[in-house]
Image: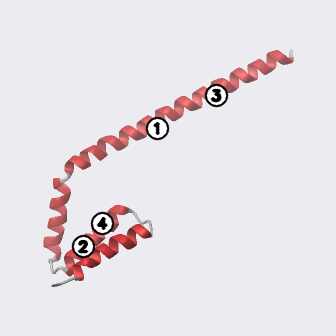
Amino acid sequence: MNYWPLLGVAVIVIGFALRFNPVPVVVSAALASGLLAGIHVPALLALLGKSFVSSRMLLIFVLWALPTAIAAFVIQSVRVWLYQRRLQQRAAHANDEAAH
């Protein structure tokens, strides 16, 4: 039995332990396991591409959810900034009236 393809698991453990970006870690682990299992590079890339395309629902979710979350963050940040600005103006106006 050939245990060399299990080095892909070590690549994942080391990559996550060093806090690398998960996507390149998983892809490099897949490449390492595939190459050590004797799969040729074109077949391995075809397999990775097929797996990526088959999970396109995740891709659609990411393409929808990320811009929506960023837009919500920006909108809420602007609302908080405007509210704080209005409170500072009211406080300054109240201080001016109290001084006179």
Give amino acid for label 4.
Val
Which quarter of the image is occupied by the C terminus?
top right
Q: CA distance from mark 3 to mark 1?
A: 18 Å
Question: SS of the residue at dot 3?
Answer: helix
Q: Residues within 10 Å of mark 2 (few under 14, many from 20)?
A: some
Task: Identify residue for label 1.
Answer: 73
Q: CA distance from mark 3 to mark 2?
A: 53 Å
Q: CA distance from mark 2 to mark 1?
A: 37 Å
Q: Quadrant of residue 25?
A: bottom left
Task: Identify residue for label 2.
Answer: 31
Q: Is residue 57 above or below residue 86?
A: below
Which mark sits nearer the N-terminus, 1 or 4? Answer: 4
Question: SS of the residue at dot 4?
Answer: helix
Q: Position of residue 62 (x, y in %)?
A: 30, 46
Q: Is residue 46 above or below residue 63?
A: below
Task: Identify residue for label 4.
Answer: 26
Please name the colour scheme applied to the rendered image.
secondary structure
